[in-house]
């Protein structure tokens, strides 16, 4: 073997440490808000081989990936973002990292404040999306049939 390349075990993109021992497409899914399809689009936008190990990429390729992740929402159609119509601004946004969980919490708190049906279901810890509750989704102590003493 000629020359062994050094592998960086952690590559930092979008405030997330990505595993350098995985391929680019798999490693990008480590960012919250980036799935497999989004990762393939980001790799294509950055013109980076998706099957290459993340730790073996040159620094300029990693910079291209960072730029592609940051500018993802502006370059893709509205149906490809994870927040197609923001409540406050009305524009299409793609949330990444901790933005995903904080925005979800804010949305649930808004529903609770306006006392919507979904907000009340969230408050009481019941099913929100119309599932049946008679026999499923039970938490806490198990309920069974008690037998009569003979």
Image (cartoon, rainbow, N blue to C red):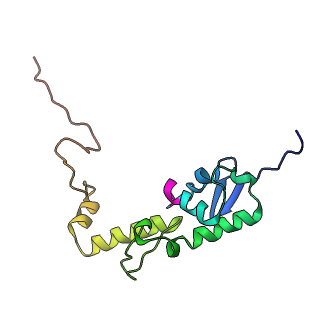
The answer to whether residue 59 is above or below residue 126 is below
Q: Give the magenta range.
A: 34-38
Left or right? Give the position of 32 relative to 112: right
Q: Residue 47: within the magenta?
A: no
Residue 42: x, y in percent? 57, 63
Determine whether, in the image, residue 83 is placed left or right of residue 70.
Answer: left
Q: Is residue 44 left or right of residue 62?
A: left
1 relative to 93 in the view: left or right: right
Q: Residue at x 11, y 20 (%)?
A: 149
Quadrant in which the N terminus is drawn: top right
Quadrant hosting residue 97 = bottom right
The percent position of residue 78, horizontal first and vertical second, equals: 41, 72
Foreground of the two, 129 or 102: 129
Q: Could you tell me which residue is drawn at 25 percent across and 54 percent down?
A: 127
Residue 37 on the magenta span: yes
State which quarter of the image contains the C terminus.
Answer: top left
Q: Is residue 33 visible?
A: yes
């Amino acid at each position: 073997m000629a020359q062994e390349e050094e592998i960086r075990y952690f590559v930092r993109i979008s405030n997330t440490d990505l595993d350098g021992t995985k391929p680019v497409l798999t490693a990008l899914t480590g960012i919250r808000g980036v799935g497999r399809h989004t990762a393939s689009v980001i790799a294509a936008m950055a013109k980076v081989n998706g099957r290459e190990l993340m730790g073996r990429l040159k620094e300029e390729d990693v910079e291209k990936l960072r730029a592609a992740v940051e500018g993802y929402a502006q370059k893709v159609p509205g149906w490809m973002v994870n927040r197609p119509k923001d409540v406050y601004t009305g524009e299409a946004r793609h949330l990444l990292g901790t933005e995903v969980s904080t925005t979800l919490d804010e949305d649930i708190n808004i529903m609770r404040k306006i006392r919507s049906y979904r907000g009340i279901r969230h408050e009481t810890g019941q099913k929100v999306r119309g599932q049946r509750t008679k026999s499923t989704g039970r938490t806490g102590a198990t309920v069974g049939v008690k037998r009569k003493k003979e």
